[in-house]
Image (cartoon, grey):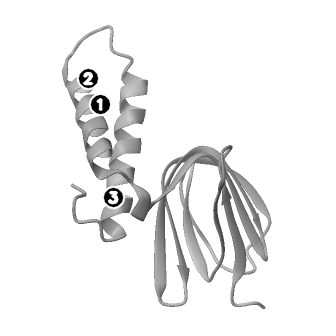
Amino acid sequence: MADTFQLEIVTPDKLVVKDTAEEMQIPGKNGYMGILPGHAPLISELGVGQISYRNGHETHYLCVAWGFAEILPDKVTILAETAERGEEVDCERAQKAKERAEKRLASGDAEVDVARAQNALAKASNRLEAAAKEGQTTAH
């Protein structure tokens, strides 16, 4: 059995990652899944969360929101609505988005779309976490 698999992460705008990986974690809609070379074929819906993958001694982190994953024994393809490498996150913008979402949720205003605010909070928090894992010191 091979020690690695091909990995592609694609958004409607661009190819975000084309690499090989020894292992990875992805946020399925109902929880995280671990993937190793030789994994059984599977198609899964993605939720909001972080993708981590290891290639050699380096682990890479990305934040993703919504989409699908096609997992084959020798290749994983992620088709995400949004995907961003941890080192590319604008931490100031993500922190402001997090604060706005927290303010909306805490307001008690009946006009607030709670599901949308919770989604915005999850996305902003994931962006900040991925940035921090990639060594951005401005992440909170």
User: Which amino acid type is shown beneath numbered disc 3?
Assistant: Glu
Gap between marks 1 and 3, in whole Å?
Answer: 16 Å
Judging depth in this view, the residue of 111 and 127 nearest the camera is 127
Give the residue displayed 76% in from the left and 71% down from the top. 75
Q: Position of residue 23 (x, y in %)?
A: 59, 78
Judging depth in this view, the residue of 55 and 138 nearest the camera is 138
User: Which amino acid type is shown beneath numbered disc 1?
Assistant: Ala
Quarter occupied by the C terminus: bottom left
At label 2, counting other C-alpha atoms closer than 10 Å, the crowd grade (few under 14, some 14-19, many 20 or more) is some
Q: Which residue is mark 3?
A: 129
Where disc 2 sits, the SS reads helix
Drawn side of residue 27 relative to residue 89, left or right: right
Q: Position of residue 32 (x, y in %)?
A: 52, 59
Gap between marks 3 and 2, in whole Å?
Answer: 21 Å
Q: Which mark is residue 16?
A: none
* CB-based contact (under 8 Å), mark 1 and mark 2: yes
Give the residue displayed 61% in from the left and 83% down from the top. 22
Judging depth in this view, the residue of 137 and 35 nearest the camera is 137
Gap between marks 1 and 2, in whole Å?
Answer: 5 Å
* CB-based contact (under 8 Å), mark 1 and mark 3: no
At label 3, counting other C-alpha atoms closer than 10 Å, the crowd grade (few under 14, some 14-19, many 20 or more) is many
Q: Which residue is mark 1?
A: 101
Drawn side of residue 66 relative to residue 69, left or right: left
User: Which amino acid type is shown beneath numbered disc 2?
Assistant: Arg
Drawn side of residue 5 relative to residue 127, left or right: right
* Above or below, comparing residue 14 to residue 61 in the picture: above
